[in-house]
Image (cartoon, rainbow, N blue to C red):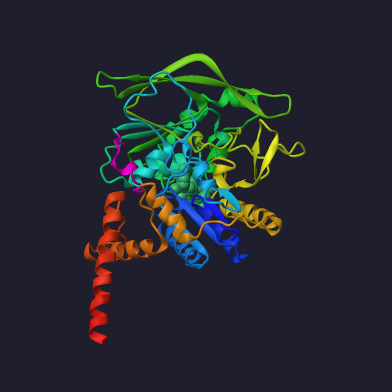
């Protein structure tokens, strides 16, 4: 059999798996989390229930394909549970790595180890109830700074200003290296928190950065910036509602200053200049001007990095893929071994594993499908690798002391979570602990086999 392994069951992995399965191959999905979905389940904002529900349905349809096999709760990687060598020993004909970008980009600031300093993805994993992040301390205080001005930063600001159940938030400050014209968030995301912006304070901030921006031919007048990014602020009747969301443009965090308990108490920020480059683009250059902000929580939303512990060759934006000199910004999908200067045939990366923090679910889906078509082309002429069967792989994983979660287990878990939701009068219920999920699966399996035994006895 020519079985294909897909590592990671986020959008890129799920849609790659679907396409390969529809081409007639057996696909074996290995996923770190018990449940599939990746950031679609554990990153997308908790209240975007319609979008999350729609994606869950699509993922369930993918898993319903008879030639897709699922092993959740299995961490692949040379520093993890199943090394790449052990994976190869199960004789896949091809492997698609769709394991996302699980690390965080770091600035290497003094004091970065202080309590109350978090990476955005870990923070959203916590409030989206992904084990083990749910059990970790992501406590927030009253004055929070978020570094970065993309959609992830705004999602987190929304959570802290509006929805976190135990919030103490009095202010959230978005700190951005560049100016207001480089805002990356979308109108539909900022709309949720525009009422938290004090229009006078934002106007004063735009005035503060007016001069360096003007030197780069950037008009950052309130009229222009409101028109492009803050539509509600154009309304003469706009009313500010605390807690406050404010912005500090042309600023980079320089040092984290902890209190006696080791928690961040202040953030030293360097002011930046904006410089016009020969090609017409701009760059932010740090000056020696510093300001200190009273901050008790700091969250970095400056992008993700690929995880070196998996053991794939590392590239600049994702795992190393075959370079394309004609198009260096668009690497290929085949894993590239820089030492031998050759591709690893039949080994691919896709989604955020290929290009970290790039795009929404639709982009990850497309990337997974393009990667799948390349794998299918390769498989047509690849020799039969005699891949282990579903039960052989399961036995092997169990022999390694793992507790892989199968498609049948996921169905049992879904049933338990549904009845928990009903019992608690909630729209949906989600376990936030792996042991609780495994226990629920075991109990439900026991209950179903008892019910089956009773039914069998009554019909015989
Ligand atoms: C905070 C946040 C909010 C977002 N909101 C939106 C939104 O509103 N709308 C939208 O369209 N997009 C949104 N996105 C983007 C979207 O989530 C991504 O485009 C998409 O999830 C990337 O898919 P992926 O499959 O490449 O990676 P991921 O979704 O990260 O999936 C990776 C999968 O690999 C598994 N994995 C990781 N390491 C291993 C390992 N070592 N072994 C085995 N399995 C492993 C993980 O368990 C996971 O299932 C958001 C992203 C973030 C961070």
Q: Is residue 292 left or right of residue 379?
A: left
Tell me where residue 242 appears, x and y as whole percent: 33, 40
Residue farthest to the bottom? 460
Count of all numbered marks drawn on residues in the image:
0
Q: Nearer the viewer, residue 353 or 151?
A: 353
Q: Is residue 288 left or right of residue 439?
A: right
Quarter that holds the C terminus: bottom left
Quarter that holds the N terminus: bottom right
Residue at point 27% right, 59% down? 440
Kindly tell me whether residue 39 is visible in this rendering.
no
Examine the residues drawn in magenta and state their main secondary structure: loop
Tell me where residue 280 appears, x and y as whole percent: 71, 29
Tell me where residue 53 appears, x and y as whole percent: 42, 61
Residue farthest to the right? 326
Q: Nearer the viewer, residue 370 or 320?
A: 320
Q: Is residue 180 depicted above or below 62 in this figure?
A: above
Q: Is residue 340 depicted above or below 251 in this figure?
A: below
Q: Is residue 134 magenta?
A: yes
Highlighted range, magenta: 128-140
Tell me where residue 219 appears, x and y as whole percent: 61, 32
Residue farthest to the top? 288
Q: Is residue 138 magenta?
A: yes
Kindly tell me whether residue 128 is visible in this rendering.
yes
Q: Nearer the viewer, residue 140 or 72?
A: 72
């Amino acid at each position: 059999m020519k079985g294909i392994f897909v590592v990671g069951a986020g959008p890129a992995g799920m849609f790659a798996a679907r396409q390969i399965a529809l081409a007639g191959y057996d696909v074996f999905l290995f996923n770190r989390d018990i449940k599939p979905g990746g950031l679609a389940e554990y990153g997308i904002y908790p209240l975007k229930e319609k979008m999350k529900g729609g994606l869950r349905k699509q993922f369930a349809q993918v898993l319903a394909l008879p030639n897709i096999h699922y092993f959740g709760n299995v961490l692949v990687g040379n520093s993890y549970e199943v090394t790449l060598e052990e994976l190869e020993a199960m004789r896949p004909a091809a492997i698609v790595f769709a394991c996302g970008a699980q690390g965080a980009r770091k600035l290497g600031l003094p004091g970065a180890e202080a309590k109350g300093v978090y990476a955005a993805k870990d923070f959203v994993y916590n409030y989206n109830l992904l084990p083990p992040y749910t059990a970790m301390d992501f406590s927030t205080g009253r004055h929070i700074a978020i570094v970065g001005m993309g959609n992830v930063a705004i999602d987190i600001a929304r959570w802290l200003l509006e929805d976190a159940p135990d919030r103490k938030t009095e202010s959230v400050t978005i700190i951005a290296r560049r100016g207001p014209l480089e805002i990356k968030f979308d109108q539909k995301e900022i709309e949720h928190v525009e009422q938290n912006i004090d229009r006078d304070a934002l106007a004063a901030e735009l005035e503060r950065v007016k001069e360096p921006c003007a030197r780069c031919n950037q008009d950052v007048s309130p009229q222009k910036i409101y028109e492009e990014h803050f539509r509600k602020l154009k309304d003469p009747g706009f009313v500010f509602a605390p807690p406050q969301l404010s912005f500090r443009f042309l600023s980079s965090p320089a040092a984290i200053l902890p209190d006696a308990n080791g928690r961040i108490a202040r953030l030293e920020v360097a002011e930046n200049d904006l410089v016009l480059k020969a090609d017409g683009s701009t760059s932010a250059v740090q000056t020696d001007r510093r300001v200190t902000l009273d901050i008790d929580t700091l969250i970095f939303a400056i992008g993700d990095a690929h995880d070196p512990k998996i053991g794939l060759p590392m590239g600049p934006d994702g795992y190393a893929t075959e370079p394309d000199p004609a198009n260096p910004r668009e690497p290929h999908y085949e894993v590239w071994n820089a030492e031998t200067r050759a591709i690893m045939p039949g080994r691919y990366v896709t989604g955020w594993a290929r290009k970290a923090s790039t795009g929404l679910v639709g982009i990850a889906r497309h990337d997974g499908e393009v990667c799948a078509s390349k794998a299918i082309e390769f498989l047509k002429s690849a020799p039969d690798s005699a891949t282990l069967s579903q039960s052989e792989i399961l036995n092997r994983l169990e022999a390694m002391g793992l507790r892989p979660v199968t498609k049948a287990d996921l169905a049992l878990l879904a049933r338990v979570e549904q009845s928990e939701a009903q019992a608690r009068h909630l729209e949906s219920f989600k376990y936030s602990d792996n042991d609780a999920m495994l226990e629920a699966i075991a109990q439900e399996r026991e209950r179903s086999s008892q019910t089956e035994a009773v039914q069998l006895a009554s019909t015989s």
